[in-house]
Image: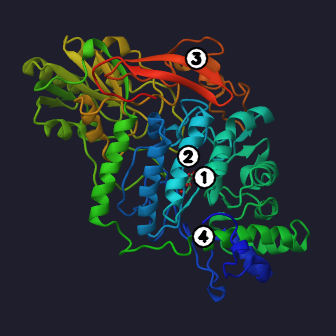
Amino acid sequence: MQGSLHREGINMVKAEDLTLIEKASLLSGQSEWESRELKHRNVPAFVMSDGPNGVRRQTGSGDHLGLGESKPATCFPTAGTVANSWDPQEARVMGEALGAEARDLGVQVLLGPGINMKRNPLCGRNFEYYSEDPQLAGRLAAGLIEGIQSQGVGACPKHFAVNSQELRRQASNSIVDERTLREYYLTAFEIAVKEAKPWTIMSSYNMVNGVYAHENEHLITEILKGEWGFDGLVISDWGGSNDIVESARVGAGLEMPAAGLASARQVVQGVKDGRVTEAELNASAQDVLNTVERTRNTHPTGDGFLAEDDKIRNHEIARRIARKTAVLLRNEKNALPLKKNAKLVVVGDMAATARYQGSGSSKVNAYRVDNLLDSLKAREDLQVVGYAQGYDRQGAERADLVKEAVNTVNTTNPDVVVACIGLDERSESEGLDRSHMRIPQAQLDMLAELVDTGKQIVVVLVAGSAVEVDFADDVDAILYVGLSGQAGALATVDVLTGDVNPSGHLAETWPVRYEDVPNSGNFPVEERDSVYREGSFVGYRYYSTRNIPVRYPFGYGLSYSTFEYSALSVDDEGVTFTVTNTSDVPGADV
Ligand code: GLC
């Protein structure tokens, strides 16, 4: 159902027919996850919940940090990982599964996707955002939104806009010139809004050029609604509303979470003081009523929990998406795919206990999580002859664990060592930014010792965003799996064994070192104003313009096949060229 509803004659109360206090009370939530219900007006509440890669439906008191309990749900790969598939159709399939789970778990608006640009690799939430490129992010977002909304659940692209660092996120002011704002930071939202028509959008915590996003007339009234024709509801981030009267005036309809009736009284007073007209208030309140109507028939078909067959089906969907997101970064002497009956030693705490999602409000209570060690052991055509933890997950130096790993390799004489390393749960999270771009030193020290054994080393790299890979030339193969969701380990084994030919390609540039990042000198900014001096020279726009060598360029990804590109032609319609698979291994390319 698209378009504004009252034109379709849906029989529901209109904002203009409500009393002042009734419509004012619609502009803020009644609990952590619910909009305001007006029982006597037959206006039900609708339920919002995170998140972008799985439904975090909390019952009872909730929180916006991923701390409290939530109902079991499917944890799909995070946005930063899905992006490596470059496939909006896969995003749509994921959206359909997410929308169905949201509906069955009692959620009417799902708070995702996250489509902020990856301005700097150290932003703590990069795992939750698609890309450094607005076109790729916009098209993937449109796919996910269409999928979610095909199930009668509202999507909510976020965080509108220019939300690029976690430090002081509720008090930071992004100062960005108009051209950069339009061309770079808003384009993904523009594509998502125009292509997929989301029913809601979430404003960001930060200020943009001095005005908080949830009350920013230029962003909301002039661009989002005025130019792009957005006819949905602008929802604040949780605690992101600063002046509800000003928000009502510019057309931001819902302050979350519950602010009691204090906000409603402020809005009524604002009308009396002439700070907001009743017509402006009606328009904002109508956005809330339209969302109620769009989601009115979206309620659980069962008991409010996932059915077993849905879990089985969605686990396979999560696995299939993860297969398409793995990026082969290095493969010397065809170390991969693993040979039949190869003897393996598996090393790494993250091999036994998977790291498969980010930390914070996107955190899903996965009903099943596969791990790399057991998934490799389950293969009849491989022999896991040893395992060692190798390192402390939180990064403490543990010479004993390194020694144990080396001994395991030396005493079992494997064909290959599969080392699973990367960022741990505390390295990248909502609410804080990374302090450097390396993986924990303890892991690097261990890897160096493994290399010294002289054995073939295959690295499975886990991280939600770019990391420094100084060890690249010391190992035989590197498979980057991102944060690949609850079925990610199975998908990783599908790729390691050659059952699946890797076709993932990086959706962000991996610089050689952090110092090469254009804004590395002023990120994250500790004071109020973060001046985006680099303009739109972010990611490949910067490195290619300045001819700065990078470790792995935007779009990089190897395959078990080899491809040739020919007959390139460019015209007003776009670019066409011929891709030829010059190997005898079937494969896909982007
Ligand atoms: C959080 C996040 C936002 C999330 C919301 C509700 O602080 O910024 O992405 O949807 O609050 O949990």
What residue did someone put label 4 on? 294
Q: Earlier in the sequence, mark 2 or mark 4?
A: 2
Q: Judge from the rendering whether residue 149 lies leftward or rightward of residue 36; answer left or right.
A: left
Q: Judge from the rendering whether residue 404 lies leftward or rightward of residue 2; answer left or right.
A: left
Viewer can see residue 50: no
Q: Is residue 323 placed above or below 204 in the rendered structure?
A: above
The residue type indicated by label 3 comes to Asp
What residue did someone put label 3 on? 516
Residue at 52% x, 37% y is 126
Considering every residue shown, the one lying at the far right of the view is 274
Q: Are marks 1 and 2 in contact (CB under 8 Å)?
A: yes
> Can you say which quadrant of the picture contains the N terminus?
bottom right
Viewer can see residue 193: yes
Q: CA distance from mark 3 to mark 4?
A: 47 Å
Residue 25 image position (x, y, % from top left): 71, 75
Q: Secondary structure at mark 1?
A: helix
**Quick one: label 4, few (<14), some, or many (20+) residues within 10 Å?**
many
Q: CA distance from mark 3 to mark 2?
A: 29 Å
Q: CA distance from mark 4 to mark 1?
A: 15 Å
Residue 332 image position (x, y, % from top left): 30, 13
What residue did someone put label 2 on? 141
